Amino acid sequence: MPMILRSTQLSLALLALMSQALIPAMAIAQRSTTPDYDYLPPAEVAKITLGDAEQAVLVRPWQGRNQYGAAVLLGDLGEDADPEGLLAFLRRELTPKGWATLSIGAPQGAAQPNHITDAGEIPKPGEQQLSQKSNQSLPKYSQEDWAALREQQKTVMSQTLGQLDSLGKSYPGKRILIVTGQSAGLVIEMLTTSALPSPDLLVVINPYLEQDEENRDLPGKLAKLELPVLDIQSPDGLPASLATQKARKALSPMGEPLRYEQQQLALNLDQPSAWQDVLTLVQGFAQRILRAYP
């Protein structure tokens, strides 16, 4: 057998063995690098400790004469404290409106599962190379795996948010919690079970959860929250978020505009004009809450 063909077979066999010996299928994806935020003024970057690791909290004080309180910003799973786009815009533009901002990185999402290749599936030289069979679904996580992942994500989120009280003492007043994507879904679940202290105002943007069952349950849990909620949906939200939009509104408290308000954006969230629309919606709803509950 030519040396090059034997080398190819050996390499494929080693790959198959390594796929079974490496990291488990269910794991929390890790950031390749930890953001250092060296592009920001040092005074904006505070530190909190989670276990043995430090995590940055980006703090911007009030600007101008109005001092209403502080807004906590939390992006989708896996995003850092200053993600490009909407949240970075809100982090900077809420401060002239009378809201100090505290921005934190979100817990990591689920890693993509490894595809384990059986030794018998390794092609011989000249045969078609590795591919997903047409009748073979991608590997799925077990319910136990998802439960463990969710518990870890919620623990990280609870510990992170719990340490913001000391940083927020310099900004007394109301508290707004602004969350997006799956982080919004997790916050809704945690507030339902009192696993997080309730803010004065919750803003959820394109909320969803990845598993079908937990996503179907989300509108009912959102409706049970006894706090003011601004629910913002963009046309480019993920299908899981768009799928529950009508149910979130239908199950909301009737005749209680200060308890729940849903707004649908006309533009996608990759458009700066949409960021300004979100800022206007948040500011307007917050002003109504301030007048109703001074």
Image (spheres, grey):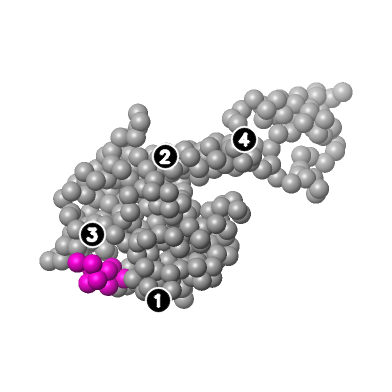
Specify whether residue 263 is in view: no
Residue at image position (24%, 71%) is 292
Circle 1 residues within 10 Å: few <14, some 14–19, many ≥20? few
Q: Quadrant of the C terminus?
A: bottom left
Q: Nearer the viewer, mark 2 or mark 4?
A: 2
Which amino acid, by three-letter code, is at mark 2?
A: Thr
Q: Nearer the viewer, mark 1 or mark 3?
A: 1
- Kindly identify which residue carries mark 4: 25
Sequence-wise, the earlier of marks 2 and 3 is 2
Sequence-wise, the earlier of marks 2 and 4 is 4
For mark 4, give the secondary structure: loop
Residue 124 position within the rendered picture, expressed as x and y whole percent measured from the top left: 84, 32
Label 2 vs label 4: CA separation?
Answer: 21 Å
Q: Which mark is residue 155?
A: 2
Instruction: Compare residues 94 and 18 and report the one nearer the observer.
Output: 94
Specify whether residue 259 is in view: yes
Q: Quadrant of the N terminus?
A: top right
Label 2 vs label 3: CA separation?
Answer: 24 Å
Q: Which mark is residue 108?
A: none
- Kindly identify which residue carries mark 3: 174
Which amino acid, by three-letter code, is at mark 4?
A: Ala
Taking the image as shown, residue 90 lies to the left or right of residue 207, namely left
Q: Is residue 284 magenta?
A: no
Which amino acid, by three-letter code, is at mark 3?
A: Lys
Sequence-wise, the earlier of marks 1 and 4 is 4
Circle 2 residues within 10 Å: few <14, some 14–19, many ≥20? few
Region of the chain picked out in magenta, as a range? 285-294
- Kindly identify which residue carries mark 1: 255
Residue 111 position within the rendered picture, expressed as x and y whole percent measured from the top left: 56, 41
Residue 260 position within the rendered picture, expressed as x and y whole percent measured from the top left: 39, 69
